[in-house]
Amino acid sequence: MHEATALRSATGALSSIKREGLEPSPNAKQLSVVITGDDLGLRADWDAGIFEALRYGVVTSTSIVTNGGTYGSAARALREGGFECGVHLNLTHGEPLSPAAEVRSLVDGRGHFPGSIGRFLLRYARRTVRLREVALEWERQLQRAVDDGLRPSHLNGHYHVHALPDLFRLTVDLARRFGIRWVRVPDEPPWHAHGPGAWVRVGALWLLGRRNRRMRGSGAVGLIPCRGHAASGALGLAAWRALLDHLGRRTPKGLAIEVSCHPGQIAEESAALLSRELAGELRARAIPRTFRELDGLSALR
């Protein structure tokens, strides 16, 4: 009992130190940035990296995969640490929460999701994916988080699958029904991509984002533009500086931006998220926030 109390006290103290270190300077532009660690609940080593970045780094929120292999332990750690999270809607990896017989268009002969974004997109392009089955599975993924007391603050998709036509509208509808305030909109131009191989992926997401922005939210749901995926796997300190430079020049005052990242997966990216240098850059240029701290700020609506 004494050890648990001491751990909670230490965690609270470290959190206070972290937040103090990220307080913006008086000269910082009024740019609010949510830094989201994606893929929580998929692997224990990735989870460890995310929680380290939440406790000691610049990450302010996370997105959890509720059908992931380490979801149970990750959900407990979220509750015990008091961290904010959203749900990372999944159609590509692992087994669905739904019985396979109810989501036949989403699974293979073993009852598993296809295992890659490429195989899922092939099904989607062939129009064999049934939207009612996606809606059923995603509702169960979201309901699991709610039932486990996680109070999701935002929604997005594993590999940004939620940005696809029809699936985006479904995501916004789920957010509205569950009282979730924010849905991610990929919003990074392809000329920011790192290497020719990424141009097609980033360009496709950018075009989907421009299309989805026209929905302008639904009722109380805000659409938050998201950056970071153009440098996915290479979001080191230099890439962060370039990203912040561009945001500082191009982002209207008062608009909130999300940056997605993947702590625990790439050494360079993880090191940047824990570095004093990046904390200092953020302090000088922006206001790091959680999604729940965005009330009253502008969104794509």
Image (spheres, grey):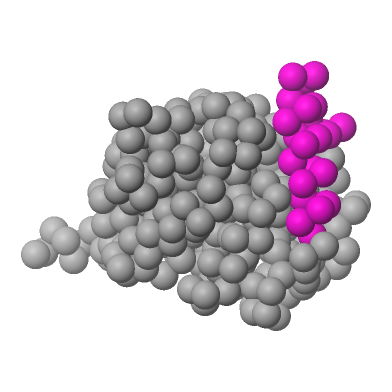
Q: Considering depth in this image, is 301 or 25 the residue closer to the camera?
A: 301
Which region shows up in magenta? 190-213
Q: Quadrant of the C terminus?
A: bottom right
Q: Position of residue 54 (x, y in %)?
A: 46, 51
Quarter occupied by residue 12: bottom left
Residue 298, horizontal then vertical, whole percent: 77, 72
Percent across and percent down for residue 213 are 79, 60
- Residue sitting farthest toward the top: 196
Residue at the (59%, 68%) spot, across then down: 173
How far from the left and from the top, in percent, is residue 266? 52, 27
Q: Nearer the viewer, residue 178 or 80?
A: 178
The residue positioned 70% from the left and 61% from the top of the image is 224
- Most foreground residue, 240 or 183: 183
In the image, is residue 144 part of the stretch drawn in magenta? no
**Relative side of 36 to 47, left or right:** right
Q: Is residue 203 magenta?
A: yes
Q: How many marks?
A: 0
| Residue 166 vertical placement versus 260 (above, below) | below
Our reading of the magenta stretch's main secondary structure is: helix
For image coordinates 82% across by 62% down, the residue present is 214
**Viewed as shown, does residue 211 lie left or right of 86?**
right
Q: In this view of the protein, which residue sits in the foreground, 79 or 154?
A: 154
Residue 37 appears in the rendering = no
**The N terminus lies in which quarter of the figure?**
bottom left
Seen at 48% across and 36% down, the residue is 92
